[in-house]
């Protein structure tokens, strides 16, 4: 019988059921989509790493200029290493898909930060020794028989110059076939490779791992990448036993000073950790929509209980136990939760397709080159999402279920007791919210990981939500007098109706407040970050014109310039001064470290702001300065020493100062070019900065440099203004996904507000009918309901301002610092706060349109008719 009652309740209010399912579905969908996008990106990185590393157990790495290729011969002949494979690798761009940045800049469009189109990973191997390392090239790998087509053409890689094997999936994407030529671009230089075979293993996982891979022989890779006579690394397969350890010891002794022997997974692990904080931030923000969805479930089940209080009271009086009533309410909630979760998983997979592009683009902008072609379905992610959705539903439905069973039958049948109880609970919840706010502050004050920071932030947000009903009651008292003086009877009715229905309006208000507070908090954080980055760029970019080769990573110049071309461009008429830069990644005892060497005039150094120390001894000595994120991650301050592996062996560099920097969350070590040249045998140049002579127009100088560079490799030549715009474009792209998640959270809150107002319209049908019978016009009814929804939206918006500022402070001073190592000041722009209040008001008014129309057009006789 109870099951039939539950089914009848759900069928009798399909809109209520639909909105509840939609709310939890959207919350689950956001969490699923972010989890799938993050997981797909990590899986693509792991597969790509597996494709290029293969079965190697150890790797020998060199400095910025790599390893001498003679080292490979010495290891095999002198040391006796049999299972070793030389590797030359790098990222290249498909030439016919290159974005012409210079042309876009000349046309007045915002340049894409010097990035190019689709990237491929070029892997140069010795095909006759590499089959032990990469199974997709192994003739004896019977499980991948089709891969022998690639092996049968391996001799072409050595016997014919400029030939390559390509992944079959990539060949299909690029419309390539065996015998066709592939045009690629490296550091602005165009190269052409002939495809002589396809890599097409039978195993689907191996096929995905090879996507975007281009395989050549060593000589072709060296010529293509401009690394003749050099190797990127040497792969080793060494057993984990006593002879293996003895062999590793002999290898280490035979290495030149600039080489380093590491385990195969060490470099990949360090690279993957670079994006961990970024993905944690996305995952935490995605859960916001689910939290707002929990408010909707709580609201739906509360309304269901309130609506059937007389029935529940009668059932209790007839002998139905509290446990059976509890099971009735929870079973209804679980039906909604299961339906919403299943729908959310489907929606999440569709949303993940779009979010994956945003996640991949951000990783390419800030960290490393990554190509992700499809969303990887992970059963663990799907199972976790199902448990999350159903668990959130059960947790949200628990208080209404307990409320339905707690009171005696006589009290349950009284509506007045419910609202008086709701007001008492609001005050108790307010005190509990203050305790939660204090607890959150204590958690945030304890030094810890980013997970601890998000836990403290969650407790703070729960505290803000609990305080909302009591704070709203406090604001409604003066607002009631103002509304009465301004709008008369209808104004007083609008404010009183909110208090009279506090058991439902408070939940909708809290959900909307949390969503708007998140929008305000993240908006203030982004505005503060933007202001800090703008100030940083103004101090860092002092030249008038910047020249670089097209880069595959938006925030890091991974391509080089020809030194002769640099000298030629520096001699352009109108150039007063020219300086160069070199950006590389070197090894350190604590993993890879980014080093930037600057050819700076000591009399005109960059205007960096220092947190500690200064630049004394850097431009005219051998000291270095480190960025704030690097100092935080390595525990450094002025006067300390940072150890880096140079071409002369490990070397300590004195840290003269710690400067504020927002270009890399991993951090950077900055030194003079003279210091760099003394430590590394690398004379390559990453960028050229030109200062215009007095009276020379910068636009004319840019045109002159481009004209002087015409006919050579493709270059990115930009003015100071254009480079700043390109940098800010990367900034905006980084936070594009954040805007999507904030919008989705607001949509869930909007659905919750609509559900609450629809429930109130059903409950107040008789009340509105009486008012209509007493002479209230449909227009006045419309105004009454609109005023009520407007007051709810206004209260939620006003209360979201302090909550949003609190959230912004935590994001700026705790989360950002623990995630990325950045320090910045907070900039609470009044426009963002006003936009938040306006957004809350607009969302509430839009949600109230249909309920207002429904109540205004309902015939009074129908509303007053007894059932």
Image: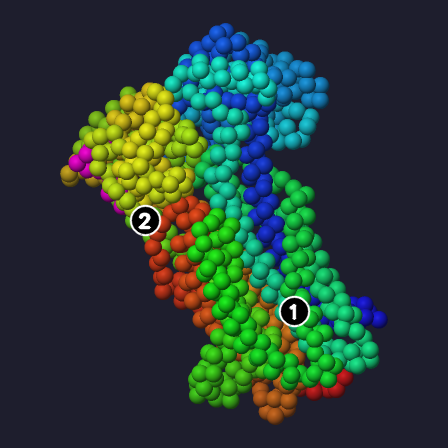
Give the extent of the magenta segment.
599-609
Give coordinates of residue 61: x percent, y percent: 45, 22
Q: Which residue is mark 1?
A: 399
Predominant SS of the magenta segment: loop
Q: Which image quarter holds the C terminus?
A: bottom right
**Residue at 58% over, 28% down:** 50
Q: In the rendered image of this protein, does residue 224 appear above or below residue 25?
A: above
Q: Which residue is mark 2?
A: 534
Residue sitting nearer the eye, 501 or 321: 321
Q: Residue furthest front?
A: 242
Give coordinates of residue 326: x percent, y percent: 74, 69
Magenta-span inclusion, residue 564 = no
Choose mark 1 or mark 2, whichever is in front. 1
Q: How is the image coloured?
A: rainbow
Residue 693: quadrant of the picture: top left
Residue sitting nearer the eye, 644 or 465: 644
């Amino acid at each position: 019988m109870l099951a039939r009652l539950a089914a009848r309740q759900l069928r009798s209010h399909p809109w209520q059921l639909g909105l509840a399912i939609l709310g939890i579905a959207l919350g689950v969908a956001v969490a699923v989509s972010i989890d799938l996008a993050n997981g797909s990106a990590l899986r693509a990185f792991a597969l790509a790493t597996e494709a290029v590393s293969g079965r190697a157990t150890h790797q020998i790495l060199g400095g910025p200029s790599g390893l001498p290729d003679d080292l490979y011969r010495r290891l095999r002949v002198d040391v006796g290493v049999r299972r070793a494979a030389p590797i030359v690798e790098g990222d290249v761009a498909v030439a016919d898909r290159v974005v012409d940045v210079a042309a876009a800049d000349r046309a007045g469009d915002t340049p894409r930060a010097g990035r190019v189109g689709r990237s491929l990973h070029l892997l140069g191997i010795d095909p006759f020794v590499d089959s032990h390392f990469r199974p997709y090239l192994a003739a004896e790998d019977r499980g991948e028989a089709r891969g022998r087509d690639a092996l049968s053409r391996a001799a072409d890689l050595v016997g014919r110059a400029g030939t390559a094997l390509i992944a079959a999936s990539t060949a299909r994407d690029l419309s390539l076939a065996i015998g066709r030529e592939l045009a690629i671009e490296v550091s602005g230089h165009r190269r052409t490779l002939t495809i002589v075979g396809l890599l097409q293993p039978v195993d689907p996982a191996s096929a995905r791992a090879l996507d975007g891979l281009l395989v050549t022989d060593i000589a072709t890779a060296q010529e293509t990448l401009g690394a003749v006579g050099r190797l990127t690394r040497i792969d080793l397969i060494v057993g984990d036993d006593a002879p293996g350890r003895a062999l590793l010891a002999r290898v280490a002794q035979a290495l030149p000073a600039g080489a380093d022997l590491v385990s195969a997974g060490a470099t990949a692990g360090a690279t993957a950790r670079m994006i961990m904080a970024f993905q944690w931030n996305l995952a935490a923000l995605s859960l916001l929509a689910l939290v707002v969805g929990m408010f909707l479930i709580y609201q739906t089940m509360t309304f269901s209980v309130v609506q059937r209080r007389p029935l529940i009271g009668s059932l209790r009086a007839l002998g139905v136990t509290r446990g059976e009533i509890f099971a009735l309410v929870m079973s209804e909630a679980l039906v909604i939760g299961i339906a919403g979760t299943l729908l959310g998983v489907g929606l999440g997979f569709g949303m993940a397709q779009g979010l994956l592009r945003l996640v991949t683009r951000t990783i390419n902008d800030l960290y490393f080159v990554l190509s992700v072609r499809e969303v990887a379905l992970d059963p663990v992610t799907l199972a976790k999402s199902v448990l999350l959705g159903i668990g959130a539903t059960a947790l949200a439905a628990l208080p209404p279920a307990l409320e339905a069973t707690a009171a005696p039958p006589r009290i349950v049948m009284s509506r007045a007791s419910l609202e008086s109880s709701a007001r008492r609970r609001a005050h108790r919840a307010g005190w509990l919210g203050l305790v939660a706010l204090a607890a959150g502050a204590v958690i945030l004050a304890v030094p810890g990981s980013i997970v601890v920071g998000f836990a403290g932030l969650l407790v703070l947000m729960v505290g803000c939500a609990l305080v909302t009903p009591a704070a709203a009651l406090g604001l409604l008292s003066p607002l009631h007098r103002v509304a009465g003086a301004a709008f008369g009877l209808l104004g007083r009715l609008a404010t009183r109706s909110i208090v009279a229905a506090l058991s439902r309006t408070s939940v909708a208000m809290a959900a909307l407040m949390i969503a708007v507070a998140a929008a305000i908090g993240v908006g203030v954080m982004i505005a503060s970050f933007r202001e800090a980055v703008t100030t940083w760029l103004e101090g860092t970019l002092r030249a008038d014109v910047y020249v670089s080769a097209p880069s595959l990573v938006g925030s890091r110049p991974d391509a080089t310039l020809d030194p002769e071309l640099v000298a030629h461009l520096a001699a352009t008429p109108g150039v007063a001064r020219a300086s160069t830069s070199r950006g590389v990644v070197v090894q350190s005892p604590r993993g890879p470290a980014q080093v930037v060497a600057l050819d700076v005039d000591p009399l005109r150094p960059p205007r960096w702001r220092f947190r500690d120390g200064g630049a004394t001894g850097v431009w005219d000595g051998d000291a270095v300065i480190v960025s704030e994120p690097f100092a935080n991650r390595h525990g450094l301050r002025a006067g300390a020493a940072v150890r880096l592996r140079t071409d002369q062996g490990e070397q300590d560099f004195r840290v003269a100062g710690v400067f504020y920097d927002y270009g890399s969350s991993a951090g950077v070590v900055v030194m003079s070019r003279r210091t760099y040249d003394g430590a590394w045998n690398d004379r390559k140049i990453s960028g050229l900065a030109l200062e215009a002579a007095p009276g020379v127009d910068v636009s004319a100088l840019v045109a002159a440099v481009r004209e002087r560079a015409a006919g050579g490799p493709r270059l990115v030549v930009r003015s100071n203004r254009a480079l700043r715009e390109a940098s800010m474009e990367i900034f905006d792209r980084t936070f594009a996904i954040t805007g999507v998640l904030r919008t989705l959270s607001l949509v869930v809150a909007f659905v919750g507000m609509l559900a609450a107002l629809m429930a109130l319209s059903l409950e107040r049908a008789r009340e509105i009918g009486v008012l209509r019978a007493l002479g209230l016009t449909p227009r006045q009814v419309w105004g009454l309901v609109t005023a009520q929804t407007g007051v709810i939206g206004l209260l939620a918006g006003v209360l979201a301002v302090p909550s949003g500022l609190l959230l912004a402070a935590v994001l700026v001073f705790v989360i950002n610092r623990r995630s990325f190592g950045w320090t910045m000041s907070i900039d609470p722009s009044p426009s963002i706060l006003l936009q938040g209040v306006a957004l809350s008001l607009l969302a509430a008014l839009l949600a109230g349109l249909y309920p207002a129309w429904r109540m205004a057009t309902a015939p009074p006789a129908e509303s007053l008719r007894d059932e």
